[in-house]
């Protein structure tokens, strides 16, 4: 959760792996400096409260921050340019020392900071994802809190993540799992959309719950490790950690 929240504020860790390593600690320190907190690298109550806020106070970008060069064209507005480069109108105005209310003249050369800010509509997209999770959980008879916890653990409700193994979307569904759901469980195709990804993930979770007699621990372990491997080898150490994290998230979501 810490890594996902850092990424949403533009302080992505080198890897989204659930481990509090040196890279995550550096990201925490950078976030704390940006939020005006003591950069101790510890995600204590003050840091957590700042992470859960929608946005941080705006400040002037550092002079060393890399920038794009952009020449204003007919029809351009600061809002459109900011959206194109995932910046903000205020940041553009401050960087170029212009008034936000002034006319933007064609041919004006702007410096556009290379920022990694969350999309302004991230909150709205998160709400849509959760609505999709709730709807398909009710449809397939899966505990909605379990489904939410699993989805958050896998992606932080982000729909544009793809793992090195090819798992993608909110539920991090692999191509093999998608084929299994379409071929065996549905008998038809499911759209490759965010909602379709949620549907496939929750339907597969419902299948695992039936296969393991309703046991959430075994089903989540099978999700992470594979059903055959769980039966043959039991829980691997990383599987146990994954299961514990998902069930802890379930209790909070």
Image: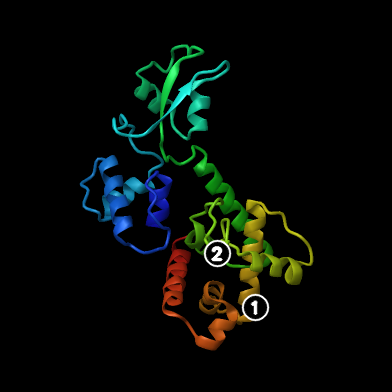
**How is colour applied across the structure in the image?**
rainbow
Residue at the image point whose x is 55% and y is 45% from the top: 125
Q: Is residue 203 visible?
A: no
x and y, in percent, of residue 224 in the image = 52, 72
The residues bearing labels 1 and 2 have C-alpha atoms spaced at a distance of: 26 Å
Q: Which residue is mark 1?
A: 210
- Crowd class of label 1 (few under 14; some 14 to 19; many from 20; radius 10 Å): few
Residue at the image point whose x is 33% and y is 34% from the top: 65
- In the rendered structure, find residue 100 and report the number of the disc placed on it: none
Q: Is residue 160 visible?
A: yes
Report how many numbered discs are placed on residues in the image: 2
Q: Which residue is mark 2?
A: 165
Name the image quarter holding the N terminus: bottom left
Q: Secondary structure at mark 2?
A: loop
Residue at the image point whose x is 45% and y is 64% from the top: 249
Tell which tag, 1 or 2, sits nearer the viewer.
Answer: 2
């Amino acid at each position: 959760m810490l890594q996902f929240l850092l990424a949403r504020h533009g302080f992505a860790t080198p890897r989204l792996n659930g481990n509090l390593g040196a890279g995550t600690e550096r990201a925490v320190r950078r976030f704390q400096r940006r939020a005006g907190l003591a950069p101790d690298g510890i995600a204590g109550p003050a840091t957590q409260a700042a992470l859960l806020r929608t946005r941080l106070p705006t400040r002037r970008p550092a002079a060393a921050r890399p920038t794009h060069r952009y020449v204003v064209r007919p029809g351009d507005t600061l809002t459109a340019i900011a959206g194109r480069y995932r910046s903000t109108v205020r940041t553009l105005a401050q960087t170029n020392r212009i008034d936000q209310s002034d006319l933007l003249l064609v041919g004006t050369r702007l410096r556009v900071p290379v920022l990694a800010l969350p999309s302004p509509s991230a909150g709205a997209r998160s709400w849509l994802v959760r609505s999709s999770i709730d709807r398909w959980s009710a449809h397939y008879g899966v505990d909605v809190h379990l489904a939410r916890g699993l989805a958050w653990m896998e992606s932080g409700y982000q729909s544009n993540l793809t793992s090195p193994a090819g798992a993608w979307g909110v539920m991090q569904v692999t191509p093999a799992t998608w084929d299994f759901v379409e071929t065996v469980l549905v008998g038809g195709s499911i759209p490759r959309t965010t909602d379709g990804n949620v549907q496939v993930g929750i339907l597969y979770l419902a299948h695992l719950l039936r296969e393991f007699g309703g046991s959430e621990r075994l089903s989540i372990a099978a999700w992470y490790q594979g059903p055959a491997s769980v039966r043959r080898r039991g829980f691997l150490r990383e599987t146990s950690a994954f299961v514990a994290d998902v069930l802890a998230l379930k209790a909070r979501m």
